[in-house]
Amino acid sequence: MASSVQTTSITLPKGVAPLRAGTGTSFFWRRLHSLSGIVPVGLFLLEHFLSNVEAANGVAAYNAQVKFLTGLPFRLGLEIFGIFIPLAFHALYGIYIWWRGENNVIDYPLSGNWFYTLQRYTGIVVFFYVIYHLWYMRFAGVHLVVHSDAAFWKVQHELSNPLALGAYVVGVVAASWHFGYGLVLFAAKWGIVTGDKALKRAQGAGIALSALLVIIGLITIYAFVARPTQQLNPDWNQSESVAPAEQGRMIPQSIPSSQVR
């Protein structure tokens, strides 16, 4: 008995096309976030560490370094577009990535996973530390753009508070690890480092860089707290609108108006 086989044509709905490298906004923003952590944010961090360690050479050396930095041409533009905007983007998008991610360090307790998790959480610590540090040093109290000679005193005065001192130590350690191991993640994400052996060497280099930055940061902090306490100069409290260069052109009030020509 012959049986006929009936064939039926079934149309299946098309699935979602796989996301390929180089497509999609998520890929673009994550790559931009990774790059911004190196240029310019990472470069600024290195410059900040190297500039601050001038405190180990004394009050005059540190104040001279601050005077040089605050006197750079187009300083305000450099701060806004070279520091503030990239730093805000890197921090806020980093928090978004952290918030959307899943912590699987308990399920997969590998060293690399622990390092990655620590790198993410130190980013949160650095975020709050930078807000505090930036507000106090750049916008509150004595204005260092006008009174660069008050730079050493201002930092030393802040570190005289034990809570502030503890915050600075934690911030230095967190920033050092976040940048040092962030370089490892950057190299892996951008294909600069491939293979297990190369990744392990990169991890060793990143950890070593983190340790070096911690040492530099702690030396800097010690340079402030170990030196004799600087005294507040009353002139530092004057309005920032009166720049030192303008002070020389001001007419002393003690001179009678009849003598002014």
Image (cartoon, grey):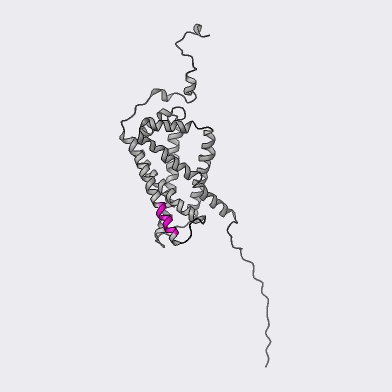
* Displayed quadrant of residue 47: top left
Q: Position of residue 219 (x, y in %)?
A: 34, 40
Q: At 43% across and 34% down in the image, what residue appears?
A: 137
Q: At 41% across and 53% down in the image, what residue appears?
A: 205
Left or right: 193, with 218 as reference point: right
Q: Which residues are magenta?
A: 198-206
Q: Position of residue 150 (x, y in %)?
A: 40, 29
Compared with residue 67, is residue 169 higher up or lower down, i.e. above or below? below
Q: At 41% across and 40% down in the image, what residue appears?
A: 50
Left or right: 55, with 37 as reference point: left
Task: Quadrant for the N terminus, please.
Answer: bottom right
- State the residue in front, 89 or 176: 176
Compared with residue 251, is residue 182 higher up or lower down, i.e. above or below? below
- State the residue in front, 163 or 111: 111
Q: Is residue 140 magenta?
A: no
Q: Position of residue 185 (x, y in %)?
A: 47, 54
> Is residue 161 visible to us here?
no
Compared with residue 193, is residue 172 higher up or lower down, i.e. above or below? above
Q: Is residue 205 magenta?
A: yes
Q: Position of residue 132 (x, y in %)?
A: 43, 39
Q: At 54% across and 39% down in the image, what residue appears?
A: 81
